[in-house]
Every structure is written in C-alpha cells, then in structure tokens.
C-alpha cells in the first residue's frame, strides 16, 4: 500500500462509476481526495463510502479549479511526497499511476506526464487525433516543451512541483496551463506511456470531438 502519495480526483456527476474507480485505486493508494465540483447527484456520498476524502465546491468551478483545490488539500499532509491527478470516469489505470510514481522516486524528474501517444495506438477516432495533435503543436510553440500529449489528466508530481504549480484556468484548458507552469517554473519533466480506456460512459462525459474543439478554443482565446 502506497502511503506517501495522494491521488487527486476531480469529481462532477460521476456517481455511476466513481465508486468502482475509488475502490480499485484504494487497493494501492491509501490516500485519495475527491474534489466534488458542485455535483448534482450523489457522487460525493458514493466517493466517501468508497473510502475517499471528499472536499466540496458549493458550485461547479471547473476541472482546473478542482485540481487546484485538491493539490492544496494534499499539500497540507507533511508526510506526502508525491501527488497524482487522476480522472474519476474510469479512463485511467491504477497500474499506470503506480509506475509513474515509481519513476518519480528515482529523483531525476519533478513531474511525469501521461501520454497516450507513446506506445500503443490510442483508441480515439481519427478526427479527435487530429485535434489533439494540433493542440500538441500549439503547446510546443508557446511553451517550448517537447510533449506529445497536452490534455492527459494523468500526471504524477513530487512535492516541489505540486507546490510550484498554480492553476488559474478553470475550464478544460487547465491542461495547457499545467505545461506553462512547468516551463515557467523550470520543472524537470518527462512523458510516460499510458493507456486510456475509452468507455461509452467516458465518451458521453467529455471525450467527444466537440470537447476537443472546445479545448483548442480555450487555448487560443481563453
């Protein structure tokens, strides 16, 4: 059981799946904080029953704000050395999160970024892959970071990185803000190949092509 790491899980209307997500993660991670971002269902209660600490936003502020709240909460634990951002819709694998934390333990990088474009081909449709690749090129130009995936919600950070990053972009473009914070704070980073599970549920919740287009809009005009 990993006791020096917090899983930080943004939560918004995920009662259908979040219980299983937390129960699965709890097999390996002792500390999980869910930030309930104004859910209108019983997501928070389901997460608590599954064993997570739940911090509530009274209204929906967006995933970026939820991550910032979760990071601030986890940093209050003096025993915490590592911090993992992990989506609540079942698309991430606990085995990937564990491997990314183990990479951090080697002390060579401050943050490990999950990438679905390394290793096996991703399951997303061709149009979405085009949009995601366009986002990558935009970020490479603006941040100078050599990344292959700009909007993967699975990330692992050491304490220095978690305390250095401040997210102000509440909407989905917070992924780009993460990269800009890495560049501005000169954090040591690398990417790690992860597998995203695209279920019917996760696609319905926000993996559509229109969501990707909205991300691009936020990047350029947000």
Image (spheres, rainbow, N blue to C red):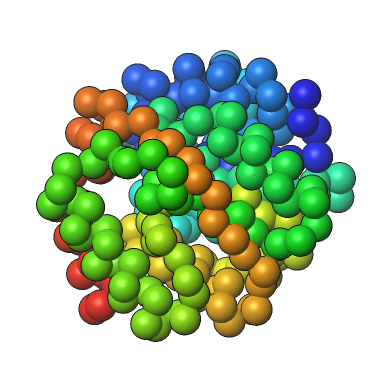
> Residue 135 or 13: which is nearer the viewer?
135
Residue 87, located in which quarter of the rendered image? top left
Tell me what residue is drawn at x 59 percent, y 61 percent.
190
Asked whether, in this view, residue 171 is left or right of residue 161, the answer is left
Q: Residue furthest right?
A: 79
From what the image shows, is residue 22 above or below residue 137?
A: above
Asked whether, in this view, residue 51 is left or right of residue 19, the answer is right
Position in image of residue 71 (x %, y %): 63, 53
Tell me what residue is drawn at x 35 percent, y 20 percent.
16
> Residue 20 or 140: which is nearer the viewer?
140
Quadrant in the picture for the N terminus = top right
From what the image shows, is residue 6 above or below residue 71?
A: above
> Residue 7 or 143: which is nearer the viewer?
143
Position in image of residue 188 (x %, y %): 67, 69
Tell me what residue is drawn at x 44 percent, y 25 percent.
18
Tell me what residue is drawn at x 48 percent, y 41 percent.
194
From what the image shows, is residue 16 above or below residue 165?
A: above
> Residue 151 or 15: which is nearer the viewer?
151
Position in image of residue 38 (x %, y %): 39, 42
Quadrant in the picture for the C terminus = bottom left
- Asked if one can make out residue 179 in the rendered structure from this viewpoint, the answer is yes
Count all numbered tags in the image, as a single digit.
Answer: 0
Position in image of residue 169 (x %, y %): 41, 68
Asked whether, in this view, residue 150 is left or right of residue 78, the answer is left
- Asked if one can make out residue 57 in the rendered structure from this viewpoint, the answer is no
Asked whether, in this view, residue 53 is left or right of residue 34, the answer is right
């Amino acid at each position: 059981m990993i006791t020096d790491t917090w899983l930080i899980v943004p939560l918004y209307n995920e009662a259908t799946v979040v219980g299983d997500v937390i129960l699965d993660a709890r097999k390996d991670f002792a500390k999980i904080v869910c930030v309930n971002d104004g859910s209108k269902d019983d997501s928070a209660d389901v997460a608590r029953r599954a064993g997570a600490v739940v911090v509530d936003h009274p209204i929906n502020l967006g995933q970026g704000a939820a991550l910032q709240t979760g990071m601030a909460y986890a940093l209050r634990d003096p025993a915490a050395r590592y911090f993992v951002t992990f989506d609540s819709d079942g698309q991430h694998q606990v085995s990937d999160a564990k491997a990314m934390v183990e990479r951090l333990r080697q002390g060579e990088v401050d943050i490990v970024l999950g990438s679905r474009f390394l290793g096996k081909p991703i399951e997303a449709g061709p149009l979405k892959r085009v949009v995601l690749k366009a986002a990558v090129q935009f970020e490479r130009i603006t941040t100078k970071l050599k990344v292959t995936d700009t909007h993967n919600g699975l990330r692992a950070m050491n304490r220095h990185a978690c305390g250095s990053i401040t997210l102000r972009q509440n909407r989905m473009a917070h992924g780009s803000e993460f990269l800009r914070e890495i560049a501005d704070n000169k954090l040591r980073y690398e990417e790690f190949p992860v597998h995203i599970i695209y279920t019917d549920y996760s696609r319905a919740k926000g993996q559509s092509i229109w969501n990707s287009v909205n991300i691009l809009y936020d990047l350029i005009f947000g």
